[in-house]
Image (spheres, rainbow, N blue to C red):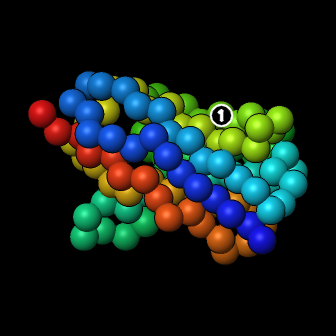
């Protein structure tokens, strides 16, 4: 059974940094691309980033240059390092794998002074 559990969300001031984690289980983590998405209040899902099995990364325009995604295949953990946070980054962040529809429940990130 595929499980994805996000953690690390918090309240942070504008300009601050935060690192999110996504612990994966139930599949061979190293073989699949992994993605981060977010959903802001009253809005639809927005793609944030993807990291392939060969560690190539891609980012949405809104976060490019500020966010960095990485993975630890030995620990089955996906990361999202978020720097220079803005109020518009406020959202529930969740991870997805590319092998099926399962997504995590998400972790809340609030950027506010």
> Where's residue 66, x and y in %?
43, 29
Residue 109 position in % (x across, y down): 34, 46
The residue pinned by badge 1 equals 70
**Residue closest to the far bottom:** 101
Residue occupying the point 81% across, 51% down: 29
Query: Residue at horizontal 69%, vertical 42%?
Result: 77
At which x and y percent is residue 8? 45, 40
- Does residue 15 show up? yes
Looking at the image, residue 17 sits to the left or right of residue 60; the answer is left
* Residue nearest the observer in this picture, 60 or 8: 8
Residue 59 in picture, x, y percent from top left: 54, 42
Q: Nearer the viewer, residue 39 or 56?
A: 39
Q: Residue at x 70, y 36 (%)?
A: 71
Would you place residue 38 above or below residue 13 in this image?
below
- Quarter in which the N terminus is drawn: bottom right
Residue 32 to residue 110: above or below: below
Answer left or right for 113 relative to 34.
Answer: left
Quadrant of residue 3 within the rendered picture: bottom right
94 over 45 or under it: above or below: above
Q: Label 1: state its secondary structure.
A: strand
- Residue extending farthest to the left is 113
Above or below 6: residue 56: above
């Amino acid at each position: 059974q595929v499980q994805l559990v996000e953690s690390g969300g918090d309240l942070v001031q504008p300009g601050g940094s935060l690192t999110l984690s996504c612990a994966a289980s139930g599949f061979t983590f190293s073989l699949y691309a992994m993605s981060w998405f977010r959903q802001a209040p009253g809005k639809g899902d927005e793609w944030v980033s993807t990291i392939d099995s060969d560690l190539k990364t891609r980012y949405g325009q809104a976060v490019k240059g500020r966010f960095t995604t990485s993975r630890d295949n030995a620990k089955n953990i996906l990361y999202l390092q978020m720097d220079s946070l803005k109020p518009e980054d406020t959202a529930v962040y969740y991870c997805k794998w590319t092998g099926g529809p399962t997504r995590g429940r998400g972790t809340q990130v609030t950027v506010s002074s």
